[in-house]
Image (cartoon, rainbow, N blue to C red):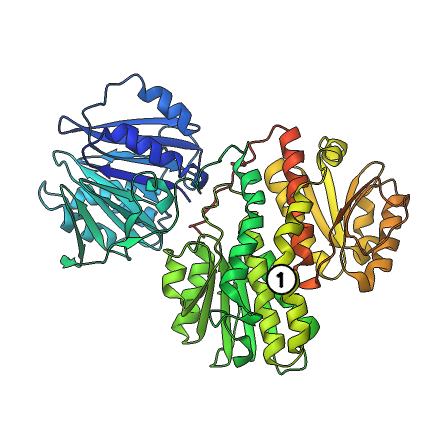
Amino acid sequence: MCGIVGYRGKKNAKDVIISCLRMLEYRGYDSSGIAVIENKKIRVIKSVGRIDELDKKLSRYDLSSCTCGIAHTRWATHGKVNEENAHPHHVGRVTLVHNGVIENYKEVEKKLKDYTFKSETDSERICALIDSFYDGNNEIEAINNAISLLKGSYALGILFDGNDKLYGVKKDTPLVLGINTGETFLASDISAFLGYTNEYIVLDDNEIVEIGDNFNIYYNNKPVYKTIEYTDYSIEEAMKNGYEHYMLKEINEQIDISRKLYSKYIHDGEFSDKLIDLSKYKRIDFIGCGSAYNASLIAKYFIDKYCTNVNFYCNCYIASEYRYTNHYFDKDVLAVFVSQSGETADTLASLRMCNSEGIDTVAIVNVLTSTMAREAKYVLPMLAGPEICVATTKGYFSQSYICSLLVLNLMYKTKKIDKEKLLEILEEYKKLPENIEKVINKDYKTVAKAIYKCEDVYYIGRGIDIYSSYEGSLKLKEISYIHSECFGAGELKHGPIALISKDTPVIALLSEFAVSEKTISNIYEAKARGGLIITIRKESINIDKDLSKHDIVVPLTNEFIQNLLIMVACQLLSYEVAKLRKCDIDKPRNLSKSVTVE
């Protein structure tokens, strides 16, 4: 859940590395540090806080002659947030940066009786372990010997005293080479070096790269030859482009993403053959974490509603629990893994378990260079482009959109809808961009001013609105730090209504017409206890003027994408609330974008 960068070339390493590191700050921002080779010696500089704090420190040093180095931005796992625990770590003749978690670091430490440690981190123990095998001239062998004793996940950037080369190795955590004329980059994510090159190589587990004037890759001490690939991502996609926050930019990008998804998965009123046919299976397991799990619930909702009598059923699982429950697997089971980064540790571990069982697997991912994209049997690209804000918006949008298409395709294949009805529904997908724009252009500031000082907010809904509430509530708590919960509206009187008192905000979602009258009755129950009622509804559901203090109405569309318009409204309301509370919207406290530890 940290970001690492390495560089060797002809430019000023400090300047290049810091610019690359800034592109990875979404992966962690407790502390940061850099190590550069200066006159054949390694200089390490670290700082607590954001990269700006490190940059201030670096201004005191003349590092203009340095052309090789490594750097790290941290999301703390082992040890407090302080300079001792910040990376890079230096032990003996080895300096390194680490992303991941070593599960047996205490056992490793017992083997290192000749070493004294300054930090609480597992990473410093890796550094010492490599040094214990290093004889001054066997870098590849020392790294291989060390990683053979490690249990857990790691991506490492490594420097050795007296050596002007850069080394990297990874297991279960991403590490990518950026290739350019006269220079090579090492990074956790392609976005780090997009400003310099779009050519890359993805390292596989336990491959060691040695970067000098050229680079060489080894596996088990034998050379490995890999093809250079090219990314379509651009540095412009990863920048704010005039928006105040990445989150606001990414909410607005949902307009264009809906066009891209339509073009990829729908052709002339037919589903593209790139879309997986669920009708070939009898059971679908959706697996994800956080917002990805919430998106998968949309698929389950519609499968349960429309496909219950086709000898077919669907489950949704939180990825961190999936491996620890019993499952029956056979050829009729499909496992669908949902992850923006494609590196989410719990989800990846579950994917590997399913692969080992021999069942078909699908990855709904945004990063096509990710481990999940490479290890799943089938891949459904999200097409969202780089998502920098830690709290996902367009990522959830893409995942939910694809989930709805999977169900529609299933319904069509199993004759739950005919061609005429399908064409009618798909026409609404085509109109989605203009409807999103209408939702974006509504007033959310007024509603935000009414609730931003509150410390408790409750979301309620029925039917699909319950699942939308999960995501709406998560978005508010992630970026505004307001305590937020969601309940099925009918559950209010079974306990949660005890939490509602005068002016407690209750945000009611209303897109499920069949139960809208019952939801409205539940809203009146909350109102009778003094709740400050906010309704977010589709325009075909009418309410009395006295029901809510604030009423946000979104355009009417078909039920398979109505939740997306509701969610855009929830995202923007959360954004305006967090802005009024002066929160760090793009980098919320304690969170990381790519959760690569279990």
Vertical side of 265 occupied by 135: above or below = above
Instruction: State the image coordinates of residue 376 (x, y, percent, origin top left).
Output: 41, 66
Residue at the spot x=25%, y=52% of the render?
A: 147
Picture coordinates of residue 337 (x, y %)?
A: 49, 63
Pick the quarter of the image with the N terminus.
top left
Tell whether 43 sits left or right of 419.
left
Is any part of residue 95 visible from this angle?
Answer: no
Q: Residues within 10 Å of mark 1 (few under 14, many from 20)?
A: many
Instruction: Give the percent coordinates (x, y) of residue 177.
Output: 27, 48
Q: Which residue occupies the foreground of this view, 309 or 153?
A: 309
Q: Amino acid at mark 1?
A: Leu
Residue 78 rendering spot, x and y as whole percentages: 41, 41
Q: Quadrant of residue 128?
A: top left
> Disc 1 designates what residue?
297
Left or right: 423 as drawn, with respect to 7: right
Residue at figure coordinates x 19%, y 35% from the top left: 92
Q: Closest to the observer: 322 or 187? A: 187
> Residue at position x 21%, y 52% from top?
208
Whether 334 is drawn above or below 244: the answer is below
Q: Residue furthest top?
A: 60
Whether residue 69 is visible to the viewer of this picture, yes or no, is yes
Q: Is residue 379 left or right of residue 40?
A: right
| Left/right of residue 367 with respect to residue 123 in the rendered view | right
